[in-house]
């Protein structure tokens, strides 16, 4: 009996509780999400919750599939994370990366939804040794920017047509060859002064600073180009020197920076009056195109001639009007004398205007002849040649600059000649 009473009274409440629990489970099942949804939500949380950041570690388990993407693990002593460096993000060659390399990686944290793998999406990789340099660069950049050294309103304008161009760079590097080649093509009449300096290594900052001080002291150029070819952050480090940056800011001569490739930036680029993407680009910016300039001068001369002719016609009309007024207001004898005087004045005015136009045209012709005379092409048309070392492109000024068996290139008025030296002869004088 007690048992029946127990079950009769107690079972109903237990049944009700079980039914409520089943109902909650049913609602929870109805609200469940798929694994894909879970991974998608987790990915969104990670990508929105963590900003892009730099991570330092050692490369391991590197894989290079045919797609061109790069997959590896980034680890330290106690942890690791998967990383993916997609082909479209790779600005330079990655073939040198290998297991065991200590690197500095910039990117964002994400999840590969298909497998639910937590990973780092890489946007940039640098050797770990450059990490300290990168931090120094950012600190100096922030410091100088706060002082206003990067402000555009303090920068000087470049001359429209410089009288002389100074170039601070290595005299044996590719940068100076590129600059001279472009300047000769665009405007050969403008002379170039080279202030030699090392552009890489421990001595480079002081040599660059010394070359700039020399250019300022001699004051023989009205624009300067400071240049070198491309390279790594460490290769370009001389141009991140604080003393050099402050000297560029203080220079009374406008300065164009032309350092590395278009994607490379140095402190010198930020403080210079103008940044060129490459050394060749600096040469394009510093002078106008010769042919366009001559066309502009010719157009200006034609405008002067038209204005002179128009002024002459206006004065002639005024004289005609005065002649008619005089004929109406004076006796015939006085009128006749006035007509003669006016005719004389008209003739003198016409001769004077024509002489002025002739003088202007003569000066323009002399200027164009002078430009043509100093052009290397005019020299070549007279039967001369420019002889260069075929390997280095250096213009040969002495016979003993090459030896038997060396290849040389001779630029003629039309075309080039490639030859091999059989023997040389050097004058005693």
Image: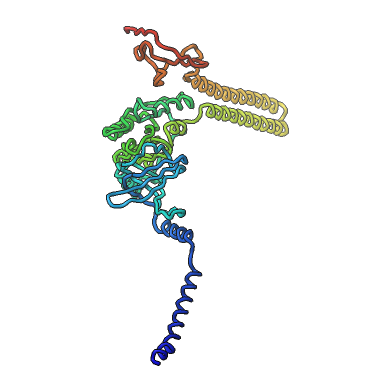
Q: Of 254 and 119, which appears nearest the observer?
A: 119
Lateral position of residue 25 relative to residue 203, left or right: right
Q: Which residue in the rendered view is the most extreme toward the bottom?
A: 1
Q: Which residue in the rendered view is the most extreme toward the front?
A: 1
Lateral position of residue 84 relative to residue 368, left or right: left
Q: Please say if 263 is above or below 306.
A: below
Q: Of 76 and 48, which appears nearest the observer?
A: 76
Q: Tell me, yes or no, if residue 130 can be seen here.
A: no
Q: Of 252 and 43, which appears nearest the observer?
A: 43
Residue 225, x across and y down, in percent: 39, 32
Residue in the image at 45% along x and 77% along y: 21
Count of labels in the image: 0
Residue 218, x across and y down, in percent: 32, 29
Q: Of 361 and 341, which appears nearest the observer?
A: 361
- Colouring of the image: rainbow
Quarter holding the C terminus?
top left
Q: Please say if 361 is above or below 35.
A: above
Residue 297 position by quadrant: top right
Residue 322, x across and y down, in percent: 68, 32
Residue 127, x across and y down, in percent: 33, 41
Residue 358 position by quadrant: top right
Q: Tell me, yes or no, if residue 362 can be seen here.
A: yes
Quarter holding the N terminus?
bottom left
């Amino acid at each position: 009996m007690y048992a029946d009473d127990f079950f009769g009274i107690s079972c109903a409440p237990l049944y009700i509780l079980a039914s409520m629990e089943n109902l909650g489970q049913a609602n929870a099942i109805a609200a469940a999400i798929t694994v894909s949804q879970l991974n998608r939500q987790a990915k969104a949380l990670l990508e929105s919750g963590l900003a892009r950041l730099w991570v330092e570690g050692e490369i391991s388990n590197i894989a290079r599939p045919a797609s061109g993407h790069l997959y590896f693990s980034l680890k330290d002593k106690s942890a690791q994370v998967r990383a993916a460096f997609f082909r479209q993000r790779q600005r330079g060659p990655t073939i040198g990366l290998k297991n065991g390399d200590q690197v500095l990686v910039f990117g964002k944290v994400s999840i590969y939804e298909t497998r639910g793998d937590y990973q780092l999406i890489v946007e940039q990789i640098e050797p770990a040794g450059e990490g300290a340099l990168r931090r120094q660069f950012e600190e100096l950049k922030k410091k100088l920017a706060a002082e206003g050294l990067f402000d555009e309103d303090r920068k000087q304008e470049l001359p429209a047509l410089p009288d002389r161009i100074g170039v601070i760079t290595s005299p044996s590097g590719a940068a100076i060859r590129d600059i001279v080649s472009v300047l000769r093509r665009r405007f050969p009449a403008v002379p170039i002064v080279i202030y030699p300096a090392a552009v890489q290594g421990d001595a480079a900052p002081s040599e660059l600073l010394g070359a700039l001080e020399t250019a300022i002291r001699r004051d023989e150029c009205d624009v300067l180009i400071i240049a070198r070819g491309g390279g790594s952050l460490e290769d370009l480090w001389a141009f991140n020197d604080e003393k050099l940056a402050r000297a560029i800011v203080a220079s009374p001569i406008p300065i164009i920076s032309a350092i590395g490739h278009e994607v490379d930036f140095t402190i010198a680029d930020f403080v210079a009056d103008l940044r060129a993407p490459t050394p060749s680009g600096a040469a394009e910016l510093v002078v106008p195109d010769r042919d366009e300039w001559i066309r502009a001068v010719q157009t200006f001369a034609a405008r002067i001639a038209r204005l002179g002719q128009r002024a002459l016609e206006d004065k002639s009309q005024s004289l005609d009007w005065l002649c008619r007024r005089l004929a109406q207001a004076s006796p015939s004898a006085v009128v006749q004398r006035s007509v003669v005087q006016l005719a004389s004045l008209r003739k003198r005015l016409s001769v004077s205007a024509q002489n002025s136009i002739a003088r202007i045209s003569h000066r323009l012709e002399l200027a164009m002849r002078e430009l043509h005379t100093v052009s290397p092409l005019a020299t070549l048309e007279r039967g001369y040649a420019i002889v260069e070392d075929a390997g280095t492109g250096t213009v040969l000024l002495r016979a003993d600059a090459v030896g038997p068996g060396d290849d040389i290139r001779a630029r003629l008025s039309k075309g080039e000649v490639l030859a091999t030296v059989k023997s040389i002869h050097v004058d005693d004088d």
